[in-house]
Image (cartoon, rainbow, N blue to C red):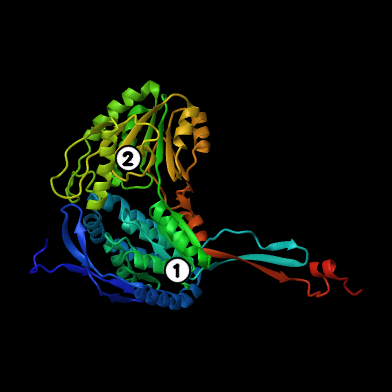
C-alpha cells in the first residue's frame, strides 16, 4: 500500500463543465497490484445533476448546423491528439496495456473515429424527397434523441468512450457516460480535454462509480437511449432496467469468436494470425480468436507452429519496449482466468503453458487448451484472457456447425485460399464481422456489432450515427386542394 506521506493523484468527475471530486476510491496498477491513484465516486444524485446539465446543453448543441458540430468535433480530436502521449501512458498504467498497443493502436484509432464522425455527419443517407403519395411531397429528417446514457467496459476504456461519444454528439445529442470503476482515468481526461478544446459545458459528462450510478443512468426518465458495452449478463440487466421506459438501446455484449483454419490455408499466416487475434490486449477482447478450429490434415502442423509462436510472446511490464502483452485488468479477473485453466486440467484436458510471467501484478501467460469437448466451459464461456482453445474438424459442414455452436455472434474468421469456400463461410458464420485470412482489424468506416447474445446496434460507421438519431417523416401537401386525400375517399365523398 502507499504510505500516508505519499500524495496520490485524484481524478474527479466532469459534470456540466465542473470537476466534481467528491468521494474516493483507490485505483490499482495491474502491473504491480498497488494503489497508484484515487478517483471520485458518484451517486444517483450526481447522475441527476449530470443528466440535467446534458439536457440543458443539448438544446443549443442540437441546434447547431452540421458544419458547426463537425468543426467542434475536429477541434476536439486535434486537442486529444496533442495529448496522445499523455493519454497512452495513462491508459497503459490504468488498464495494464502494453505501451506499444496504446501508442500505436488504441489512442490514434479512437481519435480517428471522432474525426470520421465529424465528417460523416455532413453527408447523411436517406430516402430522396419526393411524391410517394399523389399530391404530397415526403421527406425524411434525422433528429437527435436528446440525452444519451453510456456505460463502457474496462478492456478498452479510451476507445470505447470515443466510440460512444463520437456518434452521439455528432448526431446532436449530449451524453452522460459511466466508465468502468477500475479504469476511469483516460475517460475523465477525455472530458477535461473536450472542455479545453472549446466543446460546450454539459455536452460530455462523466460520472464515475459502480452499480448505483449505472442503474441510475438506465432508469433516468430524461435519458432517451442507453448505449452499453460489456458482458451479456450485465447487458440483460441494462435492458431490464431500460425497458419500462421504452428507452432506445445499443448493446455490444460478449463474444466467443471462432477462428476456422482449413487444410488449404497458409498455415504460417494462420498461426501468426492466431497469436495476434488471440493474445492482443492480453486476450481481453470480445472479438478475440478464442475458439480455433483446425482441419484434421493440418492440425498437428498448426498446433506445433502456434505453440512455438506463443512461447515467443513477451509478457511483461506495460512500459517495457519489448513487452507484447501486459497484465490482466484486476486480481479478480486473474482469478477467473486461472479458474478456467484449473477446471480444464481437472477434466484431463491437455493444457500448454507458454512462457513465464513477472512475480508481482496480475499477469497470465499465453496458454493453449488442446482438443477439449465442445461442451467444456473453456469452449462455451468467455475466458477473456490469453487463452486459446484449439480443436479439430473434418469437413466444411462440421466447421460451420462448430463455429456457430455458441450463443454469441460478435466476430469470427476463416482461413482458406479457396475463394468459393471463403464466400460460403462468410455467409454461413453467424456473427457481425467475418474476417477472411486475418483476425481483428477494424476501420472507423465499417460497423461493429453482433448477432444473437452478442447484442444489437452498431458502433463505428454511418450505421452508428443512425443509432443515435430518430427518423421523422415530414409530409407536405403540394396542391392546396383540401378536398382531396385518402380520408375523403375512405370516409366520405368529396363535394363536386
Q: Secondary structure at mark 2?
A: helix
C-alpha distance separating marks 1 and 2? 36 Å
* Residue 94, image quadrant: bottom left
Q: Nearer the viewer, residue 247 or 62?
A: 247
- Front: mark 1 or 2: 1
Name, please, the residue furthest toward the top.
Answer: 297
Q: Nearer the viewer, residue 244 or 27?
A: 244
Residue 119 visible in the displayed image: no
- Above-or-below relation of 258 to 125: above
Quadrant in the picture for the N terminus: bottom left
The image position of residue 66, as x and y in percent, is: 50, 68
Circle 1 residue: 219
Quadrant in the picture for the C terminus: bottom right
The image position of residue 454, as x and y in percent, is: 45, 49
- Please tell me the numbered disc located at residue 278: 2
Q: Secondary structure at mark 1?
A: helix
Amino acid at each position: 500500500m502507499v504510505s500516508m506521506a505519499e500524495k496520490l493523484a485524484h481524478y474527479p468527475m466532469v459534470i456540466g463543465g465542473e470537476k466534481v471530486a467528491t468521494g474516493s476510491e483507490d485505483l490499482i496498477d495491474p502491473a504491480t497490484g498497488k494503489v497508484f491513484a484515487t478517483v471520485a465516486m458518484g451517486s444517483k444524485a450526481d447522475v441527476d445533476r449530470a443528466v440535467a446539465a446534458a439536457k440543458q446543453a443539448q438544446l443549443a448543441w442540437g441546434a447547431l448546423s452540421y458544419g458547426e458540430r463537425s468543426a467542434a468535433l475536429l477541434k476536439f480530436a486535434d486537442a486529444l491528439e496533442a495529448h496522445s502521449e499523455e493519454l497512452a501512458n495513462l491508459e497503459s498504467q490504468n488498464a495494464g496495456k502494453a505501451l506499444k498497443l496504446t501508442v500505436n493502436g488504441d489512442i490514434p484509432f479512437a481519435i480517428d473515429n471522432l474525426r470520421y464522425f465529424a465528417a460523416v455527419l455532413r453527408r447523411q443517407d436517406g430516402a430522396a424527397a419526393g411524391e410517394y403519395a399523389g399530391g404530397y411531397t415526403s421527406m425524411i429528417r434525422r433528429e437527435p434523441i436528446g440525452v444519451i446514457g453510456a456505460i463502457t467496459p474496462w478492456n478498452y476504456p479510451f476507445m470505447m468512450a470515443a466510440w460512444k461519444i463520437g456518434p452521439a454528439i455528432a448526431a446532436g445529442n449530449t451524453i452522460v457516460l459511466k466508465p468502468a470503476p477500475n479504469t476511469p482515468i483516460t475517460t475523465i481526461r477525455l472530458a477535461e480535454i473536450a472542455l479545453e478544446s472549446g466543446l460546450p459545458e454539459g455536452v460530455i459528462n462523466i460520472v464515475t462509480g459502480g452499480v448505483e450510478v449505472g442503474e441510475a443512468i438506465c432508469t433516468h426518465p430524461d435519458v432517451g437511449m442507453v448505449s452499453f458495452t460489456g458482458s451479456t449478463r450485465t447487458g440483460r440487466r441494462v435492458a431490464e432496467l431500460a425497458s419500462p421506459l421504452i428507452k432506445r438501446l445499443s448493446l455490444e455484449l460478449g463474444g466467443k469468436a471462432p477462428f476456422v483454419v482449413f487444410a488449404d490455408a497458409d498455415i504460417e499466416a494462420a498461426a501468426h494470425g492466431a497469436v495476434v487475434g488471440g493474445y492482443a490486449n492480453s486476450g481481453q477482447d470480445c472479438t478475440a480468436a478464442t475458439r480455433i478450429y483446425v482441419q484434421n490434415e493440418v492440425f498437428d502442423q498448426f498446433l506445433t507452429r502456434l505453440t512455438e509462436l506463443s512461447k515467443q510472446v513477451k509478457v511483461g511490464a506495460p512500459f517495457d519496449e519489448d513487452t507484447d502483452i501486459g497484465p490482466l485488468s484486476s486480481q479478480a479477473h486473474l482469478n477467473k482466468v486461472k479458474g478456467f485453466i484449473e477446471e480444464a486440467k481437472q477434466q484431463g484436458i491437455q493444457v500448454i503453458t507458454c512462457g513465464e510471467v513477472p512475480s508481482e501484478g496480475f499477469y497470465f501467460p499465453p496458454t493453449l487448451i488442446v482438443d477439449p469437448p465442445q461442451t467444456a466451459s473453456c469452449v462455451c464461456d468467455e475466458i477473456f484472457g490469453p487463452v486459446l482453445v484449439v480443436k479439430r474438424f473434418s469437413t466444411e459442414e462440421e466447421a460451420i456447425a462448430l463455429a456457430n455452436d455458441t450463443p454469441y455472434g460478435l466476430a469470427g474468421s476463416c482461413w482458406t485460399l479457396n475463394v468459393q469456400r471463403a464466400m460460403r463461410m462468410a455467409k454461413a458464420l453467424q456473427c457481425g464481422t467475418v474476417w477472411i485470412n486475418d483476425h481483428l482489424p477494424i476501420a472507423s468506416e465499417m460497423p461493429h456489432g453482433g448477432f444473437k447474445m452478442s447484442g444489437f446496434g452498431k458502433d463505428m460507421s454511418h450505421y452508428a450515427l443512425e443509432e443515435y438519431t430518430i427518423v421523422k417523416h415530414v409530409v407536405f401537401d403540394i396542391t392546396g386542394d383540401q378536398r382531396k386525400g385518402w380520408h375523403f375517399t375512405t370516409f366520405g365523398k368529396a363535394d363536386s
